[in-house]
Amino acid sequence: MTLLTRRQFVASATAALLPGLATAQKTGAAMRLRCRFADQDFSFLLQDNATTRDLVSLLPLVLSIADFSSNEKLAQLPRRLDESGRQPIADEAPGDLCYFRGWGNLAFFHSGYTYRDDLIRLGRIEGGVAPLLVKGEYPLQLDLLT
């Protein structure tokens, strides 16, 4: 490999890595979402993807959280999120926080679920799912923990 070819390779590799480095610097090491409703206070360790970053850009938020089906709670967002963070989920589990592309809402899973192509995982609850088992509809406060 000639010196010019090496320089071109290094320049190309550096340019390809810069967007990822900028994102890592922008989001920090770990993002956590604080959730509060009905005297419950808990957090989610967020994944670093475009959909999560779009959610974080809306914070702080006050939404309404309500029971849906037998395994989740839903919260409707004020607008749809960037869906480019979509990737298959191979280890779905209770405590996952997902964005449901079909309705544009947050899904807080407190029981098992099966990955579908219309779910984008945003994070996983820290601690147990007990806060999500409180039945009813409540105001939900979402904030970024720093």
Image: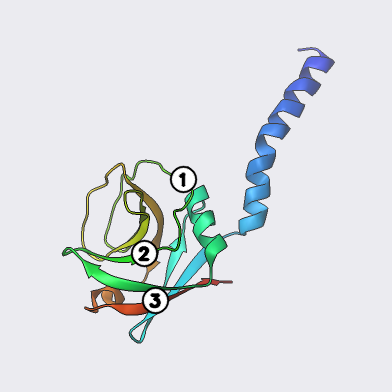
Q: Residue at x 63, y 49 (%)?
A: 23
Q: Position of residue 101 (x, y in %)?
A: 36, 49
> Seen in the image, is 36 located left or right of residue 60?
left
Q: Determine contact: label 1, label 3, CB under 8 Å.
A: no
Q: Nearer the viewer, mark 1 or mark 2?
A: 2
* Residue type, mark 3 in image: Leu
Q: Is residue 75 above or below residue 36?
A: above
Q: Which residue is mark 3?
A: 140
- Please tell me whether mark 3 sits on a helix, a strand or a loop: strand
Q: Residue at x 39, y 76 (%)?
A: 140
Q: Which residue is mark 2?
A: 76
Q: Position of residue 50 (x, y in %)?
A: 52, 48
Q: Residue at x 23, y 70 (%)?
A: 67
Q: Position of residue 13 (x, y in %)?
A: 69, 29
Q: Nearer the viewer, mark 1 or mark 3?
A: 3
Q: Is residue 49 visible?
A: no
Determine crowd level at label 3: few under 14, some 14-19, many 20+ residues with C-alpha closer than 10 A: some
Q: Nearer the viewer, mark 2 or mark 3?
A: 2
- Please tell me whether mark 1 sits on a helix, a strand or a loop: loop
> Seen in the image, is 8 located left or right of residue 103?
right
Q: Which residue is mark 1?
A: 85
* Residue type, mark 1 in image: Gly
* Residue type, mark 2 in image: Gln
